[in-house]
Structure formats: C-alpha cells, structure tokens
Amino acid sequence: MCGMPQQPPVRSSAPRPSRPDASMSLLTNVMDHSLDDGYAEAAARKQAEDAGGMPKTVRAKLGLAAGLVLAALVVTVGAANARIAAPVVAKERQELIDRVERETKTADELESTVDSLRADVNARQREALKKSGGDQADLVSILSGATDVHGPGVKLVVNDAKEASTGGGGNPRETSGFSDTGRVRDRDMQRVVNGLWESGAEAISINGQRLTALSAIRAAGDAILVDNKPLVPPYTVLAVGDGKRLSTRFQNSADGLYLHALQENYGIRTGISVEDDIRLSAAPSVIVRTAQPSTEKGTS
C-alpha cells in the first residue's frame, strides 16, 4: 500500500560553541572585577573630597585656619620689622656715603697741597741753582725730571706677541728665566730705555711715568714695575730729543737691534715714529739726597 512520500526530517541548527574559558569562570570574575566594590566606593569618595579643595572635617578646618593665621602673623611681623629697620639702614647708608665724600675731599685737598709744596720746592731749587750754576739750572731740572718738558722726539710702542708661547729646548730667552717667550719683560724695557738714553734722549717716560736717574724698572710676577708702579701693555715709550737722529741712532744701536730680534724671532710687536711735539710731565717726586755748592762761577 502506497501512501504519500514522507518528507525528510528537518535538522535543527548546530549548537553554539561554548567559551574556551567557560571552565575558568572564577578566575575570569577575579580578573574582570579586580577592585572590590567597597574599595571602589572609598576611592570615588576620596576623589570627590579632593576635588572639592577644602577639608571636610572640623579638625582639618581648624588646622587650616591655624596655618593661615600663623602665616599672616609671620608676614605682618616681618613687614613691621622691615619698616622699623628701613630708616636705620638708610641712615647708616647715608652716613657711609657722607664719610666717603669727606675722605675723598680731604684726599683731594692733600694732593693739591702736595702739588703746591712740590712746585714751591722746585722753584726754590731752581733759584738756588741759578745762584751757583747760572744758566745750567733749567738743564739740570730737565735732566733730573723735576720739571715738565716738551719738544720733538720719538714714540716707541712695545707690545706682547699676539699669541704668546712657551719656548722649548735651548731657547736663549727660556734659559734666561723667561717662561713665556712672547711676553715683554722688564729686562727688555731696561735695554730699550738705556738704548734711548745712549742715543741722545733728553727725557723719557713709559706709559706716562717719567724716568729719572733714580728710576727702577723691575718685575713682579708677569707685571713690569716702574718705580714700584705696575704698567700694562702696550708699553708706550716717549723720548724727547732730536727726533730723526734719535730714531736712527736707536734703531742702529745694539739695543735697537735686540728689540728687532725680539720682533723677528718671538713675535713681539714694536713700532717707532718721529713726533714733532712730545709732552712729558714731571716726575712724581725727586728727592735730593746730597748737594754741595759749586766752586766754579757760572757764566753769564
């Protein structure tokens, strides 16, 4: 007996696969909720309090108020002390300024007195020399450095090398005690001055310092001293005399050739020029150590 053909059974869809970590539900819960709810609530409450910027408890408020009062007290006391001390400091400062001004004025007056006495002494010396030495008084004053002079002459500038270097080996300047061959030394200036005297100079100054028969050129460390006064390079030497003749004779002398050798071998810079009018001031102090009247009568 044949009946209606039966339809094949309808298959349901395949079941959804389970999570791989389904067997580790406890561990998954711990990882997803690492912070306990109580801790999370406390953290949120603390964050809200911090955002408010003001303490919430009575003790905290009292502590803040006490701190503000203390800070205000310190500022007030400091301002009061500064206000009280200000007049005292200003008074002491003004007294110091007045004292400096008084001492400066006194020093200027003493210097003026010294200059007047020096001029008086020089005048008396010249008068005494005129009585015994005749017309040679002015010449003696010029040669001794006791009076100002001006006239033709030469200007010699001596300066250190641009790049001073230390010599080595058998360097003659190093063996003579020079640690830096590019520096101008006291013995160099001594030779320059002596060479100018020998070449006919009538009066000489170094950086405005007038030289006399008693002047000393020495060294103190790397500084050159003229009559115990330190000089700094460049060293400007002014010499009064017959300009052209003085320049030629000095450059051809042994001391002039020595200075030229320093320029050629060690880079020391030099320059000489003939000047029409050179002015030299008198020496700061000329001390007459011994004196005796001349037995010869001066010529008129």
Image (tube, rainbow, N blue to C red):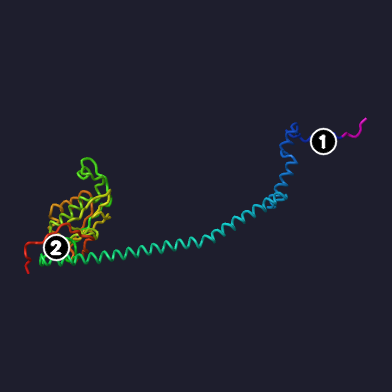
Looking at this view, is 90 or 259 the one in front?
A: 90
Quadrant of image for the C terminus: bottom left
- First of labels 2, 1 by sequence position: 1
Which residue corresponds to the image point at 69% horizontal and 52% vertical from the top-left? 54
* Amino acid, disc 1: Ser
Is 184 positioned to the left or the right of 99 in the image?
A: left
- The residue carrying mark 1 is 12
Which label sits in the foreground, 2 or 1? 2
Residue 123 at x, y percent in the picture: 18, 67
Q: Is residue 138 visible?
A: no
Instruction: Name which residue lies at 63% across and 53% down.
Output: 70
Q: Secondary structure at mark 2?
A: helix
Near mark 1 (Cα within 10 A), the count class, few <14, some 14-19 or many ≥20, is few
Give the vertical position of 156 relative to 26 (above or below): below
User: Most prominent secondary structure in the magenta stretch?
Assistant: loop
Please identify the residue farthest to the bottom as the structure is shown.
Answer: 300
Identified by mark 2, the residue type is Val
**On the rendered structure, is 297 left or right of 115?**
left
Q: Is residue 90 above or below residue 27?
A: below
Q: Magenta stretch?
A: 1-6
Whole-number angstrom distance, CA of label 2 to CA of label 1: 143 Å
Residue 102 location, quadrant:
bottom left
The answer to whether marks 2 and 1 mark residues whose Cβ atoms lie closer than 8 Å is no
